[in-house]
């Protein structure tokens, strides 16, 4: 009789421990990284040849998101399901002159980034 009581308590302890471990691990497993969608509208007179992604405050750029495409003047391009490892992500465009334009978008939102002739460019000069 005493052995069966000890055995039941052991089984209950093992079950309780397993449930506790599962409840503790559940938030870690359910933390899916947010995604965002960025529609890039080119209202400038320059073609955008490359688009990169980067964490904010970092120079660790992704591969070219356009592949072999370009975003010509008056055209747009949609980046869908962009995975973010932070709350924001930087979108960098390189135009036909080799100059860079960038914007920061909030992850989880669907945003439109409109590039115009007045958009500030970084052409590597002083």
Image: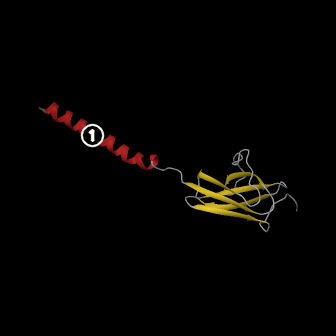
Residue 69 drawn at (x, y percent):
73, 48
Residue 72 drawn at (x, y percent):
76, 56
Residue 33 drawn at (x, y percent):
53, 51
Residue 39 drawn at (x, y percent):
64, 58
Along the line of sight, the residue nearer the viewer: 29 or 53: 53
Looking at the image, residue 112 sits to the left or right of residue 100; the answer is left
- The residue shown at (68%, 52%) is 53
- The residue shown at (29%, 43%) is 16
* Mark 1 surroundings: few (<14), some (14-19) or many (≥20) residues within 10 A: few
**Residue with the most extreme right position:** 126
**Residue with the most extreme bottom position:** 118
- The residue shown at (36%, 47%) is 23
Name which quarter of the figure residue 126 lies in. Answer: bottom right
**Residue with the most extreme left position:** 1
Q: What is the secondary structure assignment of the residue under circle 1?
A: helix
Query: Please, which colouring scheme is shown?
Result: secondary structure
Q: Which residue is denoted by mark 1 in the rendering?
A: 13
Looking at the image, residue 42 sits to the left or right of residue 34; the answer is right
């Amino acid at each position: 009789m005493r052995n069966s009581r000890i055995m039941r308590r052991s089984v209950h302890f093992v079950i309780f421990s397993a449930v506790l471990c599962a409840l503790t691990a559940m938030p870690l497993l359910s933390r899916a990284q947010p995604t965002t969608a960025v529609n890039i509208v080119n209202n400038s007179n320059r073609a955008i040849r490359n688009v990169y992604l980067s964490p904010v405050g970092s120079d660790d750029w992704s591969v070219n998101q356009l592949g072999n495409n370009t975003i010509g003047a008056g055209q747009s391009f949609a980046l869908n399901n962009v995975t973010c490892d932070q709350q924001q992500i930087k979108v960098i465009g390189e135009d036909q002159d080799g100059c860079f334009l960038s914007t920061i978008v909030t992850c989880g939102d669907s945003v439109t980034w409109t590039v115009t002739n007045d958009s500030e460019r970084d052409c590597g000069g002083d």
